Image: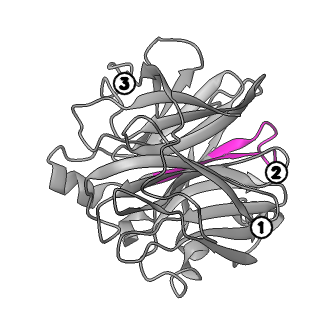
Amino acid sequence: MRAHLRDDEAAVLLVQTLRTLSMDAAAGPGRLSAASGLAHCGEWLHVVADDELKLASFRLGDAQPGRWCQLFDGDLPLPHAARKAAKPDLEALALLPPFAGHACGALLAMGSGSTTRRQRAALVPLDAQGQVSGAPQVIDVAPLLASLRAQFADLNIEGAFVDGERFCLLQRGHQRDPANACIAFDWPAVQRWLVAAGPAPVPDAIARFELGHIGGAALCFTDGAALPEGGFVFCAAAEQTDDVYADGACLGSAVGLVDAQGRLQRMEPLALRCKAEGISTRAAADGLQLLLVTDADDRSAPALLLSATLR
């Protein structure tokens, strides 16, 4: 499905910077720099970064540093090239509703699947307030992704969410192949697989999207979140890169909305030039409030938490 966003469109979505994502330095780095997935639960915001082994948690409306939660054992090397090769590339963070063994729901932090090292996930239990309430469980997601490799030569999962009875993954395209996709699995079947009570399911449906361009660079999915009435909202970045491994200059980002019938309804570029990598929502009196996190592709620059309203 094609978007109607063009390079010459003047309308932009205004954004507000709520805070920088500073962290408690006693348990890890003092900042989160490469934020890549966002989930909102109760008073808590949870964020993953594509170059960390940890989950970051922040109390909404609080400027205090975030809390770290270790997802995977070990440490990552500091030099950029070595860190990039070793990282689990956590690009998606799904908020899962209650299911067997997780009465208050859970978070699923997933690797992109773009290399064999990036096929790990962490299942993180939550309590009734939305806080982390137990040790993460490491999950090998290679069986879930195996059936997708025939569909996508450059597999790169950037978003995950539960939409009613569907568990959805967002495949990110790139400049050589800008086809993005929403891959839908049966959520009850995914639940059984997560608790080792059934095999890894195969997708029920795959919907492909073309999202338009900014500055001549194709917009490609970077995250998504389900909407209460069905469908999903997403963020997308126009990054000048031709593969799933190398980073490139980001020319801007946009947000879009897909309705419950799978139709792309709107696209709006962000007024702030940034690489929006994570998105979540909450109700607002004048529309839908979007919460977004950014990735500066620079470990010395902290990620930002942004807010915007779709009216």
Label 3 vs 1, first from the N-terminus: 3
In the picture, the quarter occupied by the N terminus is bottom right
Q: Specify start and end residues of the magenta stretch as a single range.
A: 91-107
Residue topped by disc 2: 100
Residue 244 falls left or right of residue 257: left
Residue 218 seen by the camera = yes
Name the residue located 36 percent from the left edge and 70 percent from the top edge: 175
Label 1 vs 2, first from the N-terminus: 2
- The answer for how far apart the CA atoms under marks 3 and 1 are is 35 Å
User: Where residue 295 sits in the image (x, y, percent)?
Assistant: 36, 41
- The answer for how far apart the CA atoms under marks 2 and 3 are is 31 Å
Residue 37 seen by the camera = no
Vertical placement of 142 versus 299: above or below? below
In this rendered view, identify the residue nearer to me: 12 or 251. Answer: 12
In this rendered view, identify the residue nearer to me: 138 or 214. Answer: 214
Residue topped by disc 1: 197
**Crowd class of label 1 (few under 14; some 14 to 19; many from 20; radius 10 Å):** few
SS at circle 3: loop
Residue 198 falls left or right of residue 246: right
- The answer for how far apart the CA atoms under marks 1 and 2 are is 10 Å
Name the amino acid, label 1.
Ala
Residue topped by disc 3: 27
User: Where residue 64 sits in the image (x, y, percent)?
Assistant: 46, 11
Label 2 vs 3, first from the N-terminus: 3
Name the amino acid, label 3.
Ala
- The answer to whether mark 1 and mark 2 are in CB contact below 8 A is yes
